[in-house]
Amino acid sequence: MTSTPNQATSIVANVAQQYSEQTALRAAIQLIPYVGGAIDTLFTGKASQIQTQRIEHFIHELQARMERVEMIKANIDDDAFTDFMFSTFEMVSRARSDEKRNRFANIVSRQVVEAHPWEEAEMAVRLVSVLEDIHIEVANTAHSAPTCENVFGGLRVVTLATLSNQDSTGNSPLLLSAALPHYSPAALRMACAELTAKGLLHDEGIGRWDMGAMQYFVTTDLASWLHEWLLNQSQ
């Protein structure tokens, strides 16, 4: 796999080279107030450097996981493995956070060790590519929330509703703003809406007595499937 990251970053390098040769375009960009210089610097090499560093971090994390593996089941001589790694490197190069790149490393190591259908591994990578850290934190919080009795029938429920609106009988749903105080209520609401749209959360308030939509959520089978993919096999 040592040649693959170089191939994955060569496209960025070519774009930077072509941009550097377009004098008129560079001059126009540099005239943009406040941000022109930064954009010019980005296109003339910084973007390639950033993406290379991200891929290097991913490779380091993948190496750490694979060093603890005793045997693999996947056929790494299959063309599907090549396609899988190329698409993963592309998505890794756009992943800003270390945690997100770690999630890609978890998926790759799990696939190589357990040999699931390549299509499933590719779907896991694509899904992770469109989920940010806040989405994963919300989904994980919902996955591990305490069970709620009575009206929720033993489900693990998280909520955006204020405490005064929660069910006073049995165990109350876990308040997301209390569990994840580093995110604003607006950001949590947006994350829940996006997770619901992607099928990772289910709006549990719909159809229940005196409960509004987009306030109470439970995880779905898809969320459980993704959770299994993201487990670090080396821990």
Image: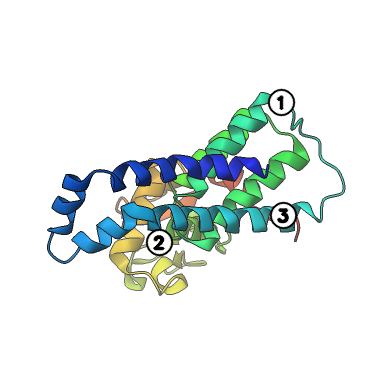
> Which amino acid type corresponds to the residue marked 1 in the rendered image?
Asp
Task: Give me the C-alpha separation between circle 3 and circle 2.
Answer: 39 Å
Dot 1 or dot 2: first in sequence order is 1
Residue for point 39% across, 45% down:
196
Q: Quadrant of the C terminus?
A: bottom right
Q: Secondary structure at mark 2?
A: strand
In the image, 195: left or right of 24? right
**Which quadrant of the figure has residue 83?**
top right
Q: Mark 2 sits on what residue?
A: 159
Residue for point 55% across, 39% down:
7
> Is the residue marked by circle 3 packed among few (<14), some (14-19), or many (20+) residues within 10 Å?
few
Q: Nearer the viewer, mark 3 or mark 2?
A: 3
> Which amino acid type corresponds to the residue marked 2 in the rendered image?
Thr
Give whichever of 136, 85 is nearer the camera.
Answer: 85
**Which quadrant of the figure has residue 121?**
top right
Q: Secondary structure at mark 1?
A: loop
Residue for point 53% across, 62% down:
98
Q: Mark 1 sits on what residue?
A: 78
> Which amino acid type corresponds to the residue marked 3 in the rendered image?
Gln
Dot 1 or dot 3: first in sequence order is 3
Task: Give me the C-alpha separation between circle 1 and circle 3.
Answer: 20 Å
Dot 3 or dot 2: first in sequence order is 3
Mark seen at residue 63: 3
